[in-house]
Image (spheres, helix red, strand yellow):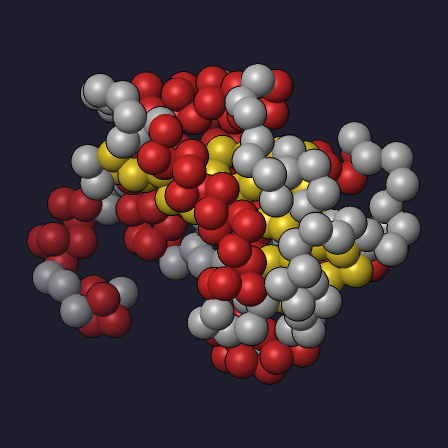
Amino acid sequence: MCEVLKISRKTYYKYRYIKDRDYKDYKEIKKVFKHSLNTYGYRRISDELQDRGYIINRKKVLRIMNKYGFRATYIKVAKNNSKAYIQENRRPDLIQREFNQKGWVTDITYLIYRNKRAYLSTILDLQTRKIVTYQISMQNDNKLVLDTLNKAIKQTKDLRGLIIHSDQGSQYLSNEYKHICISNGILISMSRKGTPLDNAVIESFHSLLKKETLYNNDIKSLKEYIEFVHLWLSFYNTSRRKQKK
């Protein structure tokens, strides 16, 4: 054994009966990782453990996962197939900069304060220029976009033939996003790559939001900034006068 491990007999016997200090946490992490079918990263595992009342932070989970070689099995495959995956899910621009027609526009923007950031995902109605729904998250991931989309779907009666227009961000190119739209009769439309004017309405909206929240108030933290955004979005939909289109 000592020859295989390339250690002295003295060292082997010294540590033979010392229990790994991470062993208890390792067992809990392993349970969650297996339950997720080897798909959860350290963030989701941390959240799951904390929801179960287990006290552990993300840094420790990441360290133990690296130590024991836990890694989501899909990550390597997704990277290798990314180009084909994106190409397959691209869609043509159905809006063609005709921004007064029936449809939704959507995008994600940063909410940044002193190097700390959150992400705002918004769906806007082209005809009314009102917010259909929005979500704020600390993670810019597929879940943010899918949660926004599902929330909009739940509160809309007739979705048949409705166009939803976005850029070609990876979240909008996901299979989940495509399947949710198709199953609800929603037509997917996308801006041309590197052409923000194709989605000018939502770009302008997010620019206005930052001007009237971050740049117009003495904000002291990211939390306060997010609170202002919630307040402003409610004001925008209920009270703020809209300019003529």
Front-lying residue, 30 or 97: 97
Residue 235 drawn above or below residue 28: above
Residue at left offset 61%, top offset 19%: 238
Left or right of 60 on screen, residue 153: right
* Residue at the (51%, 73%) spot, across then down: 193
| Res. 87 visible in picture | yes
Q: Position of residue 173 (x, y in %)?
A: 61, 65
Task: Report whether 15 appears left or right of 108.
Answer: left
Whether residue 23 appears in this view of the structure is: no
- Asked which quadrant contains residue 154, the reply is top right
**Quadrant hosting residue 119:** top left
The residue at 35%/27% (across/down) is 213
Q: Seen from this angle, which residue lies furthest front?
A: 244
Residue 61: x percent and y percent?
Answer: 36, 40
Q: Is residue 209 left or right of residue 88?
A: left
Q: Position of residue 89 (x, y in %)?
A: 67, 72
75 up-or-down from 92: above or below: above
Q: Nearer the viewer, residue 196 or 156?
A: 196
The total of numbered circles placed on residues is 0
Q: Nearer the viewer, residue 21 or 233?
A: 233
The C terminus lies in quadrant: top right
50 on left or right of 242: left
Give residue 74's quadrant in the image.
bottom right
Q: In this view, does 87 lie above or below 13?
A: below
Residue at image location 75% in from the left, 52% down from the top: 101
